[in-house]
């Protein structure tokens, strides 16, 4: 997933690779769909329909997005429509709808639901159950960043759902800007950090009481 002004080319290239390599039961090639983009849900839906009609599987990693400020600054500078959803609520809705779309089409789509949002994870869980899929169905994964939302990851794993920790890897000068961007552009980061701090403190207090 990159900036909108180059993402269309990436989408086309990845779709061609899916067309070539995702012929078996398990997709090898995955694309990332940034659901804070106004066009992302439509692109995902189009890719799924293309896969169905041409007989290849879609691999989809769903995220909210990471370039909001840059996207809006560029749109203003060059005087074109803002490509980012007008509100966080709209992005949340698009993300949840994308998760539902992928799970509903599990015969054609393998999805990684990449989010720290508790409600979005709950929606994913509910639709796995509604679809009648096994909790460990390999076509659906949940993912959170290493060091963030462990309470979500561990509880999903304990309940039998497939989970992964996403690990940014590379030179410090490349990884740190990514992490700073996540902190700056995730509007829920302050509340999330506070919640996790309280959970850590509660667990430490519990362990102290057990030792006594």
Image (cartoon, rainbow, N blue to C red):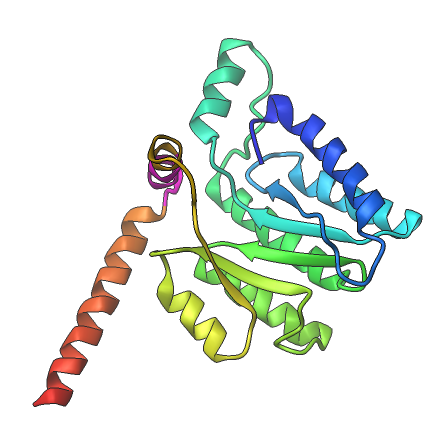
Question: In this view of the protein, can residue 120 be seen by the observer?
Answer: no
Is 85 situated above or below 59?
A: above
Q: Which residue is painted at 41% across and 71% down in the image?
A: 154
Q: Which residue is painted at 55% across and 73% down in the image?
A: 161
Residue 63 is situated, as x and y percent measured from the top left of the image, at 54, 47
Residue 29 is situated, as x and y percent measured from the top left of the image, at 71, 48
In front of the other: 96 or 16: 16
Is 79 situated above or below 88?
A: above
Residue 83 is situated, as x and y percent measured from the top left of the image, at 58, 27
Using residue 85 as the reference point, say whether residue 171 is left or right of it.
left
Which secondary structure dominates the residues rendered in magenta?
A: helix
Is 147 situated above or below 6?
A: below
Which quarter of the rendering shows the C terminus?
A: bottom left
Using residue 193 as the reference point, say whether residue 207 is left or right of it.
left
Residue 206 falls inside the magenta stretch: no
Residue 181 falls inside the magenta stretch: yes
Numbered marks: total: 0
Q: Quadrant of residue 100?
A: bottom right
Q: Which residue is painted at 70% across and 59% down in the image?
A: 110
Residue 171 is situated, as x and y percent measured from the top left of the image, at 38, 35
Q: Which residue is painted at 62% across and 75% down in the image?
A: 136
Question: In this view of the protein, can residue 110 be seen by the observer?
Answer: yes
Is 191 situated above or below 131?
A: above
Which region of the structure is painted magenta? 178-187
Using residue 185 as the reference point, say whether residue 130 is left or right of it.
right
Q: Residue furthest front?
A: 171
In front of the other: 165 or 107: 165
Which quarter of the rendering shows the N terminus?
A: top right
């Amino acid at each position: 997933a990159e900036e909108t002004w180059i993402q269309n080319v990436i989408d086309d290239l990845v779709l061609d690779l899916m067309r070539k390599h995702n012929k078996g039961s398990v997709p090898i090639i995955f694309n990332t769909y940034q659901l804070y983009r106004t066009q992302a849900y439509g692109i995902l839906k189009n890719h799924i329909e293309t896969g169905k009609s041409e007989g290849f599987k879609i691999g989809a990693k769903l995220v909210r997005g990471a370039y909001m400020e840059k996207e809006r600054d560029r749109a203003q500078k060059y005087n074109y429509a803002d490509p980012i959803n007008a509100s966080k609520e709209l992005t949340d809705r698009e993300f949840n709808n994308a998760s539902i779309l992928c799970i509903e089409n599990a015969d054609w789509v393998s999805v990684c639901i990449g989010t720290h949002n508790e409600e979005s994870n709950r929606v994913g869980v509910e639709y796995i159950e509604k679809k009648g899929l096994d909790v460990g169905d390999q076509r659906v994964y949940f993912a959170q960043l290493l060091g963030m939302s462990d309470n979500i990851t561990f509880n999903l794993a304990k309940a039998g759902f497939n989970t992964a920790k996403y690990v940014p890897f590379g030179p410090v000068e490349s990884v740190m800007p990514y992490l700073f961007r996540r902190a700056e552009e995730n509007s829920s980061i302050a509340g999330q950090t506070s919640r996790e701090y309280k959970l850590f403190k509660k667990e430490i207090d519990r362990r102290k009481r057990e030792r006594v």
